[in-house]
Image (spheres, rainbow, N blue to C red):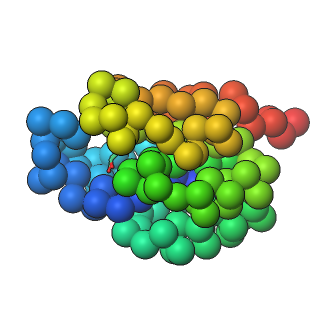
């Protein structure tokens, strides 16, 4: 069986649904996971869905992906704007990467306008809410070489 894709979620995303719903919507992370599983199935992929509030745990998951996953959808959350280390990990694994944000980070506070991750991502989707994860998986499916 082929490796799954990794959908990796950063800090505070476990609080989705409760956390600033006017910014992030009312969809919970469990609901996003269900959406991702259904979308992945539509594209012939399997999903390993994870969330951590800890930078090192996210970095370890990216390292693991080097051999265990076929591509990465990542919402680095707050680490988007701070983490050179997460960016370096994503650059090191040489897998297709799609960065996703629920909110349109460019329409928000200036400190959210810069992403350390975008320069090592193949695509960036922001402002589409939970649907952004579906778009990200659909695009990741196009970036993954299909087995014949
Ligand atoms: C976020 C945007 C980030 O700026 C923020 O720190 C988050 C979530 C988003 O999905 O819109 O935690 O990545």
- When the figure is inspected, residue 68 is found, relative to residue 4, above or below; the finding is below
Residue 30 image offset from top left, x and y in percent: 29, 55
Q: How many marks?
A: 0
Residue visible at 44% across and 49% down?
81
Query: On the picture, is 18 further left or further right than 5?
Result: left
Q: Quadrant of the C terminus?
A: top right
Q: 1 or 126, which is in the foreground?
A: 126
Residue visible at 77% across and 57% down?
92
Q: 145 or 103, which is in the foreground?
A: 103
Residue visible at 47% across and 29% down?
125
Ligand 1 occupies quarter? top left
Residue 98 image offset from top left, x and y in percent: 58, 38
Q: 85 or 99, which is in the foreground?
A: 85
The answer to whether one can see residue 97 in this image is yes
Residue 103 image offset from top left, x and y in percent: 31, 34
- When the figure is inspected, residue 29 is found, relative to residue 44, above or below; the finding is below
Which image quadrant for residue 90? bottom right
The answer to whether one can see residue 9 in this image is no
- Of all residues, the one furthest to the right in this rendering is 148
Query: On the picture, is 68 further left or further right than 87?
Result: right
- When the figure is inspected, residue 97 is found, relative to residue 138, above or below; the finding is below
Q: 79 or 131, which is in the foreground?
A: 79
Residue visible at 57% across and 45% down?
117
Query: On the picture, is 19 further left or further right than 100?
Result: left
Q: Quadrant of the N terminus?
A: bottom right
Which image quadrant for residue 107? top left
- Of all residues, the one furthest to the front in this rendering is 110
């Amino acid at each position: 069986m082929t490796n799954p894709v990794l959908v990796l979620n950063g800090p505070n995303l476990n609080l989705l649904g409760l956390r600033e719903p006017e910014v992030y919507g009312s969809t919970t992370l469990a609901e996003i996971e269900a959406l991702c599983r259904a979308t992945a199935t539509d594209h012939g992929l399997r999903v390993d869905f994870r969330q951590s509030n800890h930078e090192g745990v996210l970095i370890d998951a990216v390292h693991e992906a080097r051999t265990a996953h076929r591509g990465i959808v990542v919402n680095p959350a707050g680490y988007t704007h701070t983490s050179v280390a997460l960016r370096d990990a994503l650059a090191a694994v040489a897998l297709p990467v799609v960065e996703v944000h629920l909110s349109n980070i460019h329409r928000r506070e200036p400190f959210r306008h810069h992403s350390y991750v975008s320069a090592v991502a193949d695509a960036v989707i922001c402002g589409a809410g939970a649907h952004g994860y579906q778009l990200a998986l659909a695009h990741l499916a196009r970036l993954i070489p299909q087995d014949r």
